[in-house]
C-alpha cells in the first residue's frame, strides 16, 4: 500500500455576501494547496485575460468555482459547487455556497453535511443581513464548527482597531443565535494573509491560520458519534435466496446450501457501534434480539461503528423491513405521532397551517399535516415573531401531525435521527428542511 | 460529553475510519437507497475505471446476493477492443444482464447522422435516452465525479432529469443531509452518482486497496500512436492519422477510457496500480484536460452536453 494519502475526510461549506471575496478565498485555498492543475489554471488565465480581468495575479478565481454559464455571465454563484483538495493532514470536500438571499436554500444543501461552515465578511462592511442569515442557517443546522473569516484586512491596513469591532459584532450575533464553537480570524484572501500560514502583518492575532483550523477541528465522525447509543435505520433487507453472487459461488460452491436462508438487514449506522452478541431492539415493534453477524461486503466483522454501511444478521426471526430501526436494547426513543420542529422553507410556494405533506425521516416516508405554524424568525432582528405561514428562505417553528409514529430524537442529540424532509405530495418537491425540537 | 482540545496528532489517533472507508460507506448507502426506492435502476457501464468502481461498490452493497440491476453500455462502435472484452468478462463473472445501445443502429436507420469530424462521443446522448426509455429505467447509476469538470462540480448526487432527459442546473432540488428525495413524475428519471465525492486519486487508491481488475490499457503498454492537439491518439479504423501526422510506437497508458476517436493516451511507464497512484498524485494535468478532445471545445462543453441528457 502507498501512504501518499491523508487518513481523514473533512467537509466544509463556504458562504458569504456579494463581493466579499469568497471566490478569491476558495481560489486561494485550492491554488495554495496545489489542487488546481496546470491545464485548469491555463484555461482560467486565458479567459481572465480575454475578459480584461485586472487583478494582482491576473487570474479571476471565481471562474474556477462558478461552473455554470449563467453564473459566469452574472458573476454570482447560484448553486453549490463541490471542490476537493488535500493537505498532509486531511482530504477536504469544499461546498462553495451561494451568497444571494434568493439562493440561500442552496446554502442549506451545502451546510447539512458540513463539519464546518466558513462565513466570509468584508471587514470594511462588518455584519450584514446576509451574514446573519448565514449564521442563522448554520445555527439551525447545528454545523459543528463555525469559522468567520473577516476578509480584506489588507484594505484595513492590517489594523487591530479596525478588526476588533467587527469581531465583537460577530460574537454578539453568534451569542444571540446560540452558536458555541465560533472561530473568528482576520484574513486577506487576495494577499494570502492567515489563509495557509499565520501572517506577520497581523501580529495582534494569536490564533491559527484558516487551513490550520480546518486541519485540526474534529470532523463529525471524530466527535464520539460511535460512543452514542446505536441507531441503524434499515435501508433494505438482503434475501438473495437463489440469486447468490456467481463469483462467490464459483469460489465457494458450499455457499449455495449454507446461504439458502440468508437474511440480513442492510443500512448505514447513524450513531453508535454494533458488535456480534449485542442485545438490540427492532423498531417500531420494539422486539428484542441478539446480533448474530455484522458484515460488510459479505465479510464478517467483529464490530462496526458509525457511519459504516453494513449488513446485520439477527439471531431471531423478527420482523424487520425498510423503515425499521435497529437500536441498542433499552435506549429506544419514544415513537412520536406529532413532531415539533424548526423548518427552513426551500420552495417558492408558502407553507401554511393545514397543508398536507410527506415527511421523510431516516428510511421512512409518512404522510403528515401541518397542525400549526407558531412563529418565524426575523433575520434582521433575530426576534421570534408570530406567523401562520412560512415563505421561501424563512426559518420558523411548526407542529406536524404524522399518520404513523416515527422514532425521532431531538436534532440537538442527533443530526441523523433529528432531521427530516418536508415533501409536497403533488409534485414530489422537497419544500422544507426540518430539525426536531427538544 | 466533553471534548479534549485536539492537536493534529490527537485527531489522527481518534480517527476510526479512513477517508476511503467514509467514501465507500457513503456510496454503498446511496446505491442501497436507490435500489430500495426505485422500480428499475440500471448502471451505465463502459468498462472505464469509474464505472468499474461503482459496479464493485454495488457488488459489495448486496453480497452475498448478486447485483440486483442490469448494466447498460452505449457503444459508439469506436471502442477499444480490449475494453469490450473486459466488459463482457465482467458481466459474465458477476452474472449481470447487459443492455447495449449501439450508436451504429441509430446512424443506420437515420435517427442520427455521422458528424463531419468523425467523432461519435456527442452522438451518444440520443441512444442513451432511447435506451433508458425502452428499458423503463427510472434510475440510472453513473460513475461521474464532481472533480472531473466544473459543470459536474454542480451536480447533485441524485439528480432529476425531465422526460426529455434534460438537466436543469439552475433549478436543482435541494439535497439535505443524506436524505435523498428521488420522487419524480412518470417519464422522468434520476441520474445517480455514488462516487460524486471521489477524486481521481481516491479512485486509484480504492482500486489498489480492493484489488479491482481493470482493462489492460490503463497500464503502460507499447502502442502505435500519433500526435494530435497535444495528445497521443491511437492508430485505428475510427482514428486514422491525417496527412502529416507521424505514426510511431510509444510506451503509453490511458487515464480515461472513452471513444477511440477522441480519447488520448499519455506517455507513462506505470505498469501497476501502485505506479499509477504515484503518477496521479504528482500529475499537473487533470485527466480530462490530458486526454479528452471533447472537453477542450469550450468553457461550457460539459454543461451543454449534460443539459441535453449526456452522462
Image (cartoon, rainbow, N blue to C red):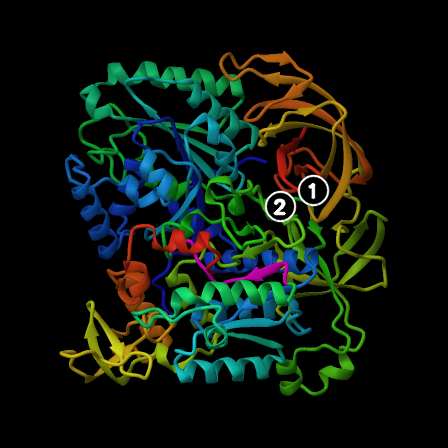
Q: Toward the viewer: B294 or B114? A: B114
Q: Are marks 2 and 1 in contact (CB under 8 Å)?
A: yes
**Left or right: A216 with respect to A247?**
left
Please report, as a chain letter, where disc 2 is located.
B
Task: Tell how many labels.
Answer: 2
Query: In this orientation, does residue A414 appear?
Result: yes
Type of secondary structure dominating the magenta stretch: loop
Quick one: which residue is furthest to the front in this view?
Answer: B110
Query: In this orientation, does residue A158 appear?
Result: no
Residue at position x 63%, y 42% from top?
A: A416
Residue at position x 18%, y 48% from top?
A: A46
Answer with the quarter of the image where residue B281 lies. bottom left
Q: Where is residue A280 in the image (x, y as percent from the top left)?
A: 78, 53
Is A259 located above or below residue A251 in the figure? Answer: above
Q: Position of residue A137 (x, y in %)?
A: 52, 28
Is B284 located above or below residue B223 in the figure? Answer: above
Answer with the quarter of the image where residue B201 lies. bottom left
Q: Is residue A90 magenta?
A: no
**Left or right: B237 with respect to B215?**
left
The residue pinned by badge 2 equals B179
Task: Tell me the quarter of the image containing the N terminus of chain B.
Answer: top right
| Residues at marks 2 and 1 on the same chain | no
Q: Give the range drawn in magenta.
A: B137-147
For mark 2, give the secondary structure. loop
The residue pinned by badge 1 equals A360
Q: Toward the viewer: A177 or A424? A: A424
Q: Position of residue A38 (x, y in %)?
A: 22, 55
Mark 1 crowdedness (10 Å alpha carbons): few <14, some 14-19, many ≥20:
many
Q: Toward the viewer: A244 or B14? A: A244
Is A410 located above or below residue B103 in the figure? Answer: above
Amino acid at each position: 500500500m502507498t501512504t501518499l494519502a491523508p487518513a481523514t475526510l473533512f467537509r466544509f461549506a463556504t458562504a458569504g455576501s456579494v463581493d466579499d471575496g469568497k471566490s478569491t478565498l476558495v481560489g486561494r485555498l485550492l491554488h495554495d494547496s496545489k489542487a488546481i492543475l496546470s491545464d485548469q489554471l491555463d484555461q482560467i488565465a486565458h479567459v481572465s485575460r480575454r475578459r480584461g480581468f485586472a487583478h494582482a495575479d491576473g487570474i479571476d478565481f471565481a471562474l474556477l468555482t462558478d461552473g455554470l454559464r449563467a453564473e459566469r455571465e452574472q458573476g454570482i454563484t447560484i448553486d453549490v459547487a463541490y471542490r476537493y483538495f488535500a493537505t498532509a493532514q486531511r482530504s477536504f470536500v469544499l461546498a462553495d455556497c451561494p451568497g444571494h438571499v434568493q439562493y440561500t436554500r442552496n446554502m442549506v444543501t451545502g451546510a447539512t453535511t458540513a463539519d464546518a461552515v466558513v462565513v466570509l465578511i468584508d471587514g470594511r462592511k462588518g455584519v450584514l443581513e446576509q451574514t446573519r442569515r448565514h449564521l442563522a442557517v448554520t445555527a439551525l443546522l447545528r454545523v459543528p464548527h463555525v469559522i468567520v473569516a473577516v476578509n480584506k484586512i489588507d484594505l484595513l491596513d492590517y489594523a487591530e482597531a479596525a478588526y476588533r469591532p467587527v469581531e465583537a459584532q460577530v460574537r454578539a450575533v453568534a451569542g444571540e443565535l446560540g452558536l458555541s464553537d465560533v472561530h473568528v480570524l482576520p484574513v486577506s484572501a487576495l494577499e494570502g494573509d492567515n489563509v495557509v500560514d499565520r501572517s506577520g502583518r497581523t501580529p495582534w492575532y494569536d490564533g491559527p491560520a484558516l487551513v490550520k483550523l480546518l486541519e485540526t477541528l474534529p470532523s463529525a465522525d471524530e466527535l464520539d458519534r460511535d460512543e452514542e447509543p446505536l441507531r441503524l435505520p434499515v435501508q433494505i433487507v438482503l434475501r438473495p435466496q437463489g440469486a447468490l453472487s456467481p463469483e462467490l459461488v464459483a469460489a465457494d460452491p458450499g455457499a449455495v446450501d449454507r446461504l439458502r436462508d440468508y437474511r440480513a438487514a442492510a443500512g448505514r449506522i447513524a450513531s453508535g457501534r454494533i458488535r456480534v452478541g449485542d442485545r438490540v431492539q427492532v423498531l417500531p415493534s420494539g422486539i428484542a434480539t441478539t446480533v448474530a453477524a455484522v458484515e460488510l461486503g459479505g465479510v464478517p466483522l467483529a464490530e462496526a461503528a458509525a457511519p459504516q454501511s453494513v449488513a446485520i444478521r439477527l439471531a431471531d426471526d423478527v420482523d424487520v423491513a425498510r423503515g425499521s430501526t435497529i437500536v441498542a436494547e433499552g435506549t429506544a426513543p419514544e415513537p412520536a405521532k406529532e413532531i415539533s420542529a424548526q423548518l427552513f422553507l426551500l420552495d417558492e410556494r408558502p407553507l401554511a397551517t393545514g397543508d398536507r405533506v410527506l415527511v421523510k425521516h431516516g428510511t421512512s416516508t409518512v404522510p403528515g399535516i401541518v397542525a400549526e405554524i407558531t412563529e418565524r424568525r426575523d433575520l434582521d432582528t433575530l426576534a421570534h415573531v408570530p406567523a401562520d405561514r412560512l415563505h421561501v428562505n424563512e426559518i420558523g417553528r411548526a407542529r406536524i401531525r404524522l399518520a404513523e409514529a416515527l422514532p425521532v430524537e431531538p436534532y440537538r442529540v442527533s443530526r441523523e435521527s433529528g432531521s427530516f424532509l418536508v415533501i409536497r405530495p403533488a409534485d414530489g418537491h422537497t419544500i422544507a428542511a426540518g430539525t426536531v425540537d427538544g | 460529553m466533553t471534548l479534549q482540545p485536539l492537536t493534529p496528532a490527537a485527531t489522527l489517533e481518534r480517527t476510526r475510519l479512513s477517508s476511503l472507508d467514509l467514501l465507500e460507506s457513503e456510496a454503498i448507502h446511496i446505491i442501497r437507497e436507490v435500489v430500495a426506492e426505485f422500480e428499475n435502476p440500471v448502471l451505465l457501464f463502459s468498462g472505464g475505471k469509474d464505472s468499474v468502481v461503482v459496479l464493485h461498490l454495488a457488488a459489495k452493497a448486496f453480497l452475498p446476493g448478486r447485483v440486483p440491476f442490469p448494466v447498460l453500455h452505449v457503444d459508439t462502435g469506436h471502442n477499444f477492443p480490449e475494453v469490450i472484452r473486459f466488459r463482457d468478462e465482467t458481466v459474465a463473472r458477476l452474472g449481470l444482464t447487459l443492455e447495449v445501445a449501439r450508436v451504429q443502429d441509430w446512424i443506420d436507420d437515420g435517427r442520427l447522422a455521422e458528424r463531419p469530424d468523425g467523432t461519435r462521443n456527442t452522438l451518444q446522448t440520443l441512444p442513451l435516452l432511447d435506451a433508458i426509455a425502452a428499458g423503463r429505467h427510472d434510475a440510472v447509476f453513473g460513475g461521474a465525479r464532481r472533480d472531473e469538470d466544473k459543470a459536474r462540480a454542480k451536480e447533485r448526487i441524485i439528480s432529476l432529469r425531465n422526460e426529455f432527459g434534460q438537466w436543469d442546473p439552475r433549478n436543482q432540488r435541494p439535497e439535505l443531509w443524506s436524505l435523498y428525495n428521488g420522487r419524480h413524475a412518470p417519464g422522468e428519471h434520476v441520474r445517480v452518482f455514488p462516487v460524486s465525492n471521489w477524486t481521481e486519486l481516491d479512485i486509484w487508491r480504492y482500486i489498489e486497496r480492493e484489488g479491482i481488475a481493470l482493462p489492460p490499457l490503463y497500464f503502460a503498454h507499447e502502442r502505435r500512436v500519433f500526435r494530435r492537439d497535444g495528445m497521443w491518439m491511437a492508430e485505428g479504423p475510427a482514428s486514422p492519422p491525417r496527412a502529416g501526422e507521424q505514426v510511431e510506437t510509444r510506451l503509453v497508458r490511458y487515464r480515461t477510457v472513452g471513444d477511440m476517436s477522441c480519447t488520448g493516451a499519455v506517455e507513462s511507464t506505470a505498469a501497476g496500480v501502485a505506479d499509477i497512484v504515484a503518477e496521479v498524485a504528482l500529475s499537473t494535468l487533470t485527466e480530462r484536460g490530458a486526454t479528452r478532445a471533447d472537453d477542450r471545445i469550450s468553457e461550457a462543453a460539459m454543461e451543454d452536453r449534460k443539459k441535453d441528457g449526456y452522462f
